[in-house]
Amino acid sequence: MIIEQLYTNCLAEAAYYIESNGEVAVIDPLRETEPYIALAAKSGVKIKYIFETHFHADFVSGHIDLARKTGATIVYGPTAQTGFESHIATDGEVFHIGNITIIALHTPGHTLESTTYLLRDKNGKDYCIFTGDTLFIGDVGRPDLAVKSDLTQEDLAGMLYDSLHNKIMPLADDVIVYPAHGAGSACGKNMSKETFALLGVQKLTNYALCCSTKEDFIREVTSGLTPPPQYFPKNAAMNKSGYENIDIVMERGNNPLPPDEFEIAAEHALILDVRREQDFVQGFIPGSMFIGLHGQFAVWAGTLIEDLRQPILLVAPEGCEHESVQRLARVGYDNVIGYLKGSFEAWQKVGKKIEVIPTVSSDEFAQIFNAGETCVIDVRKKSEYDSRHIENAENSPLDYINKQFATLPADKPAYIHCAAGYRSVIAASVLLRKGVRNIINIAGGFSAICDCNKIPVTDYTCPASAN
């Protein structure tokens, strides 16, 4: 038996490849099919099943294309309804893969169709569980994504409690937990950096499993939830109904355009610049949005580009064009129509117009800040801001920049920063597209500001307990 976890840091997502005696099961595959097909081809084995733990909201799964290319059967848990051919498992249904078995355990709560898959080895021993978004390491799935008019997040949280206590916690302590996500995913709020663990450890350390009552559990898992990114329901709908062939998506995006053709195409498309922020601030094509490929690229694209059908043109480092198209497709942006041939250097070489984002170092900002009243905008998350921030800085998280942003003074510049410089440049590019011109970026973000030790900051102070 071979179990391989294929972890994708950008999405904090784990897919699984399981092989036994010539047969393979894949669980929660990403959009691209090559990794799973290549693994099976290397061993000369056949992919028999594609198990989906639920309708994912934070990425588009590769189940449809993988089934089309391999003939494998797509399996969802009870209550699922799909727009494509699939097998809807019954609770407790057993599937055979080589010498092992996989049992579908219906575990609703995160979503109604959520299902945990229990793997038993060739000796019939419970070996591991693939929990999807039902149980994470250190956390459980958020219960607010499948809310309906007749179903509240408290209702779903109650279902989740029952699923955990009736289906998962009775399993032996030495069963391995393989979840669908780790730290950084928006599908939970307290996930560990560990990507698997023993169930017995989770019973002792996972805050949600340690709640003494169902009421406490419901209160704990429904508190402190931030609004999910706007692309979540759109990705869930694609996973449920179907989507365009990934090969067609990749072929359309792999379209090199010289500067003149790129400029014409850009009249009806979004220019997305995926270079590093240090390069972007020094020069970019007017009207571009920056989201650097080296950061949480797919998540920020899904958060900030509101129309999945938006035609997109890429400015990418040479050699990174294919990766950029692929990572956008993972979150449902299937309409990349080309990229700038020769990258930004080709645009500069022919003398076309460029823009820059005014940027100051932390030392330069310190001199400005200490010389008098300064408008400072902190685009980090509220929790980051609450922990520590520049005195009198205004918090305006990047997540909500399309719907709300700090009131900016018309008569003086606003200095913008994040933690290390990535998010502030994204914010600056979005604001420039909205016509805001008085933004100055602080290079290196809050980390550099703290390192220079010349600017007063406010630390969080825990409120005193009432006596």
Image (cartoon, rainbow, N blue to C red):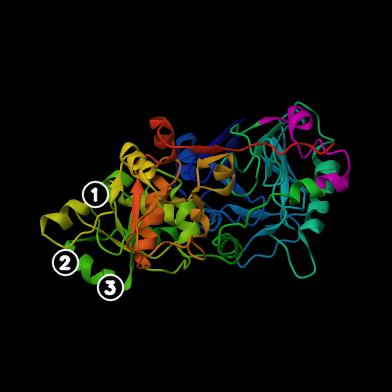
Q: State the residue position of label 3.
A: 267
Q: Residues within 10 Å of mark 2 (few under 14, many from 20)?
A: few
SS class, disc 3: helix
Q: Residues within 10 Å of mark 3 (few under 14, many from 20)?
A: few
Task: Give x and y (percent) for residue 171.
Answer: 81, 34
In the image, which residues are magenta? 197-217
Residue 104 in the figure: left or right of residue 41: right
SS class, disc 2: helix
Residue 282's disc number: 1
Q: State the residue position of label 2.
A: 260
Residue 74 in the figure: left or right of residue 306: right
Q: Quadrant of the N terminus?
A: top right
Alpha-carbon span between mark 1 and mark 2: 22 Å
The amino acid marked with disc number 2 is Asp
Q: Nearer the viewer, residue 191 or 429?
A: 429
Query: Which numbered disc, 1 or 2, marks the residue that appears first in the sequence?
Result: 2
The amino acid marked with disc number 1 is Gln
Q: Quadrant of residue 229?
A: bottom right
Q: Nearer the viewer, mark 1 or mark 2?
A: 1
SS class, disc 1: helix
Q: Nearer the viewer, residue 117 or 266?
A: 266
Q: Nearer the viewer, residue 467 or 281?
A: 467
Residue 352 in the figure: left or right of residue 428: left
Residue 200 vertical position relative to residue 243 in the rendered view, above or below: above
Residue 401 vertical position relative to residue 5 in the rendered view, above or below: below
The amino acid marked with disc number 3 is Glu
Q: Residues within 10 Å of mark 1 (few under 14, many from 20)?
A: few
Q: Are marks 2 and 3 in contact (CB under 8 Å)?
A: no
